[in-house]
Amino acid sequence: MYPYTHVVVGATIGATLFQQWRLWLLAALGALLPDLGMLSHQIYLKSNGLGWYLWPSSPIWIYTDITHSLVVWCVLLVASARLPKVNASNIAFAIGATSHAVIDVLTHGRNPSKMMTGYLWPFDYNLAVQLGIWQYHPGRFTILAKPPELVMLLTCCGLLALIIRHKLKAQA
Ligand SMILES: [Zn+2]
């Protein structure tokens, strides 16, 4: 999925779980974080007229592995929830990032290449190969969502609009 879809899904999950706008934003930022390495790399390549290439040992893969790890986000979620004073900001951010990893596990499955993260860093096990529903390739250097992503995006936009409308009515 494209980063903008992850952001909208993260914001929608944040809006269903939390009352404060700030926490919606943190959930959206958490959902964006895992793809920031790839996104910045693609922007760099595009702005320099270069084709797609990434060294297999590039630090971006390490960043991507860590930030897409369900292990990392589950540990941070549990740790945040167990702190003496529960920090809703940490939880909102981690929930957004977890939503990103869960969506990617389901939509980047059946990937034969080892270029994709396994989603269980630091363990070397590709969860997407087991749980992936389909292999979603949005295509490089395009920003148009394919129909399944568009459905998810529009559904979340609709839900978010309803939640905002309800919130504004309650405040009036
Ligand atoms: Zn991702």
Image: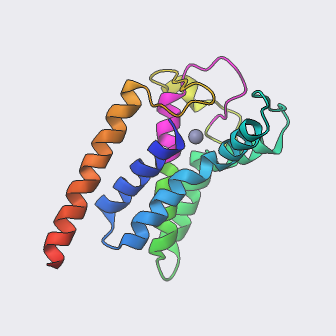
Residues drawn in magenta: 99-118
Q: Please tell me which residue is depicted at 65% across the width and 44% down the height of the picture.
A: 39
Image: 169 above or below 159: below
Asked which quadrant contains residue 73, the reply is bottom right
Image check: 70 left or right of 169? right
83 and 59: which one is in front?
Answer: 59
Q: For ligand 1, which image quadrant applies? A: top right
Image: 169 above or below 57: below
Question: Image quadrant for the C terminus?
Answer: bottom left
Image: 104 above or below 67: above
Q: Please tell me which residue is depicted at 79% across the width and 38% down the height of the picture.
A: 48
In reply to whether residue 107 is colored magenta, the answer given is yes
**Residue 105: image x %, image y %?**
52, 34
Image: 126 above or below 101: above
**Residue 74: image x %, image y %?**
54, 54
Q: Please tell me which residue is depicted at 56% across the width and 46% down the height of the picture.
A: 70
In reply to whether residue 143 is colored magenta, the answer given is no
**Residue 170: image x %, image y %?**
14, 74
**Residue 14: image x %, image y %?**
37, 60
Image check: 49 left or right of 9? right
Q: Please tell me which residue is depicted at 47% across the width and 51% down the height of the picture.
A: 7
Image check: 57 left or right of 67? right
